Amino acid sequence: MTEAPTTALEPSELSGPPGGSRSPEEEAQEAAGRSGGVWRLVGRAFIENKMALVGVGLVVLITLFCFVGPLIYHTDQAHSSLNTNQPPGGSHPLGTDYLGFDVLGRLMAGGQSSIEIGLAVALAATTFGVIWGAISGFFGGVVDAVMMRVVDIVLAIPAIFLFIFLASVFQPTLLMLIIVISSLSWLGPARLVRGETLSLRTREYVQAVRVMGGKSRRVVLRHIIPNAVGTIVVNATFQIADAILLLATLSFLGFGLPPPAPTWGGMLSNGTNYLFDGYWWQVYPAGIMIVLTVVAFNFIGDSLRDSLEVRLQKR
Amino acid sequence: MPEPAAPLAVEVRDLVKVFRLRRSPGIGGGRSAAKTIVAVDRVSFSVAQGRSLAVVGESGSGKTTLARMAVGLERPTAGQIAVGGRERRWKHVGSRERRRRAREVQIVFQDPYSSLDPRQTVGRCLDEMLRLHFDMDHARRTERIAALLEQVGLDERHAAAYPRALSGGQRQRVAIARALACEPRVLICDEAVASLDVSIQAQVLNLLSDIREETAVSYLFISHDLAVVRQVSDEILVMKDGRVVERGQTDRVLDDPADPYTQRLLAAIPRPGWHPVADPESDLVTS
């Protein structure tokens, strides 16, 4: 057996309980198990999901629109002009706003900060939340009780009021907005990962590592977090959508990036002033962009979750 | 390897484990009236180096708690455990001490489907164990992994496989290889073959006795299956409700049981012509 060459082995060679014939389904599982692990399976289920494709397609289009668009379609988003409130047409496909900024160009520029903040918040909040939740769930007892009460306390603070307070005390910058939104967004992942950890730490393979003499850090980083990574990724996707929505809300209320920085929420806010004048092009484009982006990320998150359930079924 | 100075691999004296049932442990919690369950009640036994002791009993008799205490996953309420002549202490166990204990006692869990990390290949799983315990370079670890896999009847190509790709028997072999990787004196098998089907059970049991001959490891075999016990153990300890009700040489206990509980356990083994007897005193028929 051991002299056999190590290359190109068939699944049937690898595992054969004596006298056992296996169904094609099991064969497929085995192949998946050998060729790349869990993510191969999840990936396949994800690709087969139409909602996932719509979500990914939308995100790609929106990203291209925001980051590549301005390279092709040049506009001045820093200096206002007298060419205000122009309806769509001619040199302004989506018209101009009350300061004479081109709406299409502003949409692109505003999307950049939305996507940047969304991704940064998801990354920061998820990282911190995962560490917090894993430590809390793993050590349990008093540590868990104290850490979770902290989460409860922060959760009890109404987000909008806190933001309005902070935004009026500090001058909002890109970095500050990221920090502030993250400081409230890590609570979700923290609770989620704590729950996962509570269930994972009683698994025998985690206990086996303890019996091996592995340190707590190793158990958490090598065995608990990797096994919770599916849940974490799904949640991070929703975090992006939530952060973009929260940013739009803040900007709409006037506590986002200060003018003339373009933001979708700010455009919406200014547009509503002219709603009764029939300047629809100042409201709909920004509104539609916000909805599309949030829906796209939610689609991805939902489909990822479904694909992970496929993994759970086939485990 | 057996040391002349310490002929006993494991010695357990008056071990007690009391579980407290109470509200969730929170701040201010846990002060409510506590209900207690005595899972293990003054159990003593010893296993000589290279010997094998089986602990049998119905579900809930405390045998798994005993195993978990012996391996350090559960802390005894009272009593002593000495491994290789060294007394176990339960306070301030540093990581060096934990690794040292790992080289004394290892455990193979009941369910091979949950005892291997689904995200780790067999090779990485064994590699992790070797890295923790030995200062080996990559080439030597690879060599050792191949040797371990061969020892449990797998071959080195399995190192690249994920647990999902393996059958139950193969997974249990991997779990055994992982336990053997750090060369323990004592291997605890907690119902290690209970979830395998009968033909695979026999293979794994044969494997375990081969390993005992090769490595002089001692076994503490936790089981409810008396047929399995006869095959692997020298001595037997029968437990009921946390207490030891009978102990002795395997053949003696199984052929001529003294305690009525042991007799009932034996009577409950299905065999040709066997009919479940309705016994108001026990639920052995179902367990």
Image (cartoon, coloured by chain):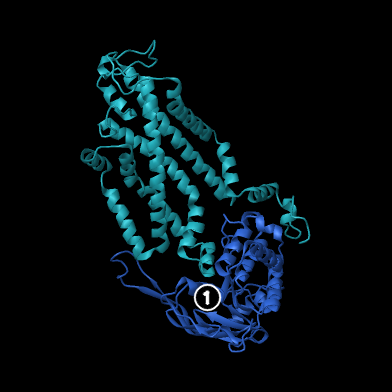
Mark 1 highlights which residue? B101
Residue A85: percent from left, percent from top:
29, 15
The answer to whether one can see residue B196 in this image is no
The foreground one among A17 and A189 is A189
The foreground one among B30 and A293 is A293
Q: Is residue B175 left or right of residue A66?
A: right
Q: Residues within 10 Å of mark 1 (few under 14, many from 20)?
A: many
The foreground one among A234 and B244 is A234
Chain letter for the cyan part: A
Q: Is residue B32 left or right of residue B119?
A: left
Q: Is residue B25 left or right of residue A44?
A: left
Chain letter for the blue part: B
Q: Secondary structure at mark 1?
A: helix
The foreground one among A265 and B20 is A265
Q: Which chain does the numbered disc 1 sit on? A: B
Residue A1: percent from left, percent from top:
78, 61
